[in-house]
Image (cartoon, grey):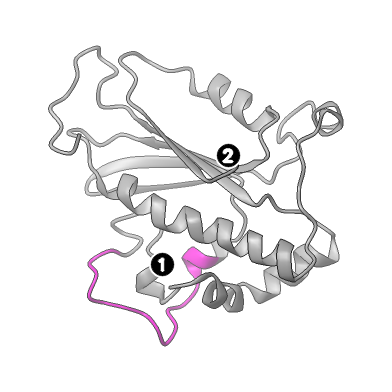
Amino acid sequence: AERNRIIYLRPMQQVDTLTLEQKIFSGPYPYHICVIHEFSNPPNVRNKVRIRSWMDTIANINQELIKYEFFPEATRTEDDLKKYTRYPWGRDIYTLEGVVDGAPYSMITDFPWLRSLRTADPNGYARYDFEDDEKTTIYAPRRKGQLSADICMETIGEEISEFRQIKKGVFQRVVAIFIHYCDVNGEPVEDDYI
């Protein structure tokens, strides 16, 4: 079934991340994709848990735009793959990097809207009962008051217009590939969260 997916990997050896990213972003997958490299050791659960909430929001925004705003839906057909044979493979790929609880992470993605949502000022719905902000996780929507796709769409209205003008399509679904590097030396690390 077509749905948002999150894939967790904890490799027991070094990974050729460039080849992995190339295969995924250049492949026939009709999803917006993010690949998160997480280096916490022992493994930190915070980024892993939070991603689920905001990846769905990104997908919900795209679904709203396609269903109700007559936005073009992006495709990954054979023709698309032939047309985009090299980086960035017809995608708008960018990197976000930071440190969460003392451990670096790096995220390579073509998720639309995320950069604007992360850097937006908090609105009237902002919730501070929640300790997270961008110092402790990749993106903290509650801290910004970005509690629903509708509210987010108000925040990114300008960017939506730009996409519309250049007829840039979006995918209805998203996939997150979360790679935890705590076990690459071949020894599984104790993990309270599994």
Q: Residue 175, how many percent across, how many down?
A: 53, 41
* Secondary element type, mark 2: loop
First in residue order: circle 1 vs circle 2: 2
Rounded to the nearest whole Å, what is the CA distance between mark 1 and mark 2?
A: 27 Å
**Dot 2, crowdedness within 10 Å: few (<14), some or many (≥20)?**
few
**Position above or below: 174 against 56:** above
What range of the chain is rendered magenta? 117-132
Query: Quarter-wise, where is residue 13 in the image?
Result: top left
Instruction: Give yes or no for residue 122 being in the magenta stretch.
Output: yes
Closest to the observer, 4 or 144: 4
What crowding class fits label 1: few (fewer than 14 Cα within 10 Å), some (14-19), or many (20 or more)?
Answer: many
Apparent side of residue 18 relative to residue 63 in the rendered image (left or right):
left
Quadrant position of residue 38: top left
Q: Position of residue 193 (x, y in %)?
A: 18, 39
Judge left or right: residue 65 versus residue 18: right
Nearer the observer: mark 1 or 2; the answer is: 2
Q: Which residue is mark 2?
A: 1
- Check whether the beta carbons of the residues at disc 1 and disc 2 lie within 8 A of each other: no
Name the residue furthest bottom: 124
Q: Which mark is residue 141?
A: 1
Q: Residue at x 84, y 66 (%)?
A: 165
Could you tell me the amino acid type at mark 1? Pro
Residue at (17% x, 34% y) in the render: 42
**Residue type, mark 2 in image:** Ala
Give the image location of residue 183, x and y in percent.
25, 21
The residue that appears at 76% across and 27% down in the rendered structure is: 86
